[in-house]
Image: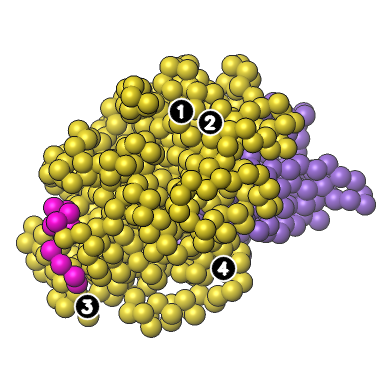
Chain colours: A purple, B yellow
Amino acid sequence: MKSFKYIEHTADVAIKASGDTLEEAFAAAAEAMFEIITDDSPVEPTRQIVVEAESDDMESLLVTFLSKMIVVFEVERMVLGSVEVKFDDSYRVTAIGTGEEFVEEKHGHGLHIKGVSYHMIEIYDGDENDPSHVRVLFDV
Amino acid sequence: MAWHGPLNRIDDWRVEIPASYQSKSLQRLRLEMKAPGLIYADEEMLRSILADDSLEQVVNVATLPGIVGASMAMPDIHHGYGFPIGGVAAFDASDGIISPGGVGYDINCGVRLLRSDLTVDDIRSRVPQLIDQMFQNVPCGVGSEGSIRLSVEDTAQVLRKGSRWAVENGYGWPDDIDTTEDGGCIRGGEASVVSETAKKRGKAQLGTLGAGNHFLEIQMVDEIFDQKVAETFGIFGKGQIITMIHTGSRGLGHQVCTDFLEVMRRANKKYGIPLVDRELACAPASSIEGQDYFAAMKCGANYAWANRQVITHFVRQAFESVLGQSSEELGLNLIYDIAHNIAKLEEHNVAGEARSLYVHRKGATRAFGPGHEDVPERYRSVGQPVLIPGDMGTASYLLVGTEQAMQQTFGSSCHGAGRARSRMAARKKHRPEEIVQLLRDRGIYLQAKSKRVIAEEAPDAYKDVNRVVEVSHQSGIARKVARLKPLGVAKG
């Protein structure tokens, strides 16, 4: 099950995103970003977008992957309601995002995410008893 | 985490962390502070500073190669990532580093101030109408796009020319350029080092405000502390109407930072620079990676100046359409525009020797004193205007740079109130409607895109701007000129 919660931080927004697998935790973090950017109005699944990211360690893979979500919003002008993530090999992901075109009146206004930071970053690959999670801080 | 390291009080306004201090993280990596930490704070401010990890961040910055003087913290310091917000650090141009983390994601986030010949009695009842018009003219909130679409060639010109591009294209007056830091353009902005993604993000965002703490405010002069300097800056008296614009380089600047954090991550390995925190990622300033970042950062800075210049034009149009007079007749001249997230190559006198330094100001304002050639000629006899935005319910300040700042802080001062309470805590504490009412009770009209942002930007989520400014004033790194009280606020 994908889920996320906010973590206290004075200036910016930090989250802990969890899932049954690390892939799900990555996906939960991406989905969280769109909840932060918009208000809590529903997102209809009318369009899909493929997002690929690659790096040379897990932490920078997460930062690179989530940074691309900002581009999905600002350049593709899409909001995503759900994200499926697949690790292609150790430091490469392919994600399929499902959502629709951003419409101001419909999706509302939340916080503008400027960047994804390494600060406080944590990646935990768990098991059945102890879910996987990622912790990440967004500069807003 | 609380601070357990040493703190030596120098005087009522400054404390020092000696360079001999070894935090646990430093011990683990066998790193040493290469310079002391210097924090501008009185006892009262220090208590809130000690509540977060910002002093550890001051220590971490002091480990970076080529640091000169001290790793400094302005009175509004708070916890950032890598570098603290409110941090000032200078690195030797030949053997020091340059770091995107010392600038931040919002390259050249900054503030500008427009004067007017109006007084509060002229427009009090029309403040809501003016704010609504500005809100309509200047797109704001997340995902907002402007009316300008930049072609590839336009983008290159904006990145090279900054404010000048805007003025040449009809957004503003030639005179605006004279009263913008660096004339609204740092030379050497090279579009070829800026990624296509960054350019795509910048294509439709010129002339937009963004969200969060960015705002447009109609303010009135509430108190004048230095009549002579105020007059030099175009301020004639209490009750005068002033407009403040606070925004930065939007998605283009953010993407430049994201791109170069990755470049620097690799450069760190290549040049073998040990880091206590990944967000301090940096490269030797003279390296190809360092110079590419500097050229790209200049582009981000120039975009931000063009952005504030275009917004200035829209703000003037709002005044014109609501009041039915021209901006010239209303005297809507630019007092000044400053950057508060930037790295600059500057020459400073260090122990009697002129040295070229990369001065990083992250959440800190340049505050050059009288006589400096980079201060506009019309202000040179008194010093550079320093603009300090406060929270939306209290006050903002106009200060002036000092010779003492030149000697102590590489000509730098504070940049704002600084957050005291997290966004989450502010949201738990206040309903948005409550904040709207609280502002109304204080005679302040608010227009905002996001209810969430209203609660998060609650006045009590910030440190007391009066206190922050007092420490800057008393310590001598900037002097108070005027206090400005908000009358109307437009927020993203």
Residue topped by disc 3: B124
Image quarter of residue B357: top left
- The spot of residue B57 in percent (x, y) is 59, 41
Residue in view at x 60 percent, y 27 percent:
B265
- Secondary structure type for disc 1: strand
- Marks 1 and 3 on same chain: yes
Q: Which residue is mark 1?
A: B68
Q: CA distance from mark 2 to mark 4?
A: 36 Å
Name the residue type under label 3. Arg
Front residue of B125/B33: it is B33
In this rendering, is residue B96 above or below B61?
A: above
Earlier in the chain: of badge 1 and badge 3, it is 1
Disc nearer the start of the sequence (2/4): 2
Amino acid type, residue under disc 2 in the picture: Ala
Q: Are marks 1 and 2 on the same chain?
A: yes
Chain where mark 2 sits: B
Cβ atoms at labels 1 and 3 below 8 Å apart: no
Crowd around label 2: few <14 · some 14–19 · many ≥20 (10 Å):
many
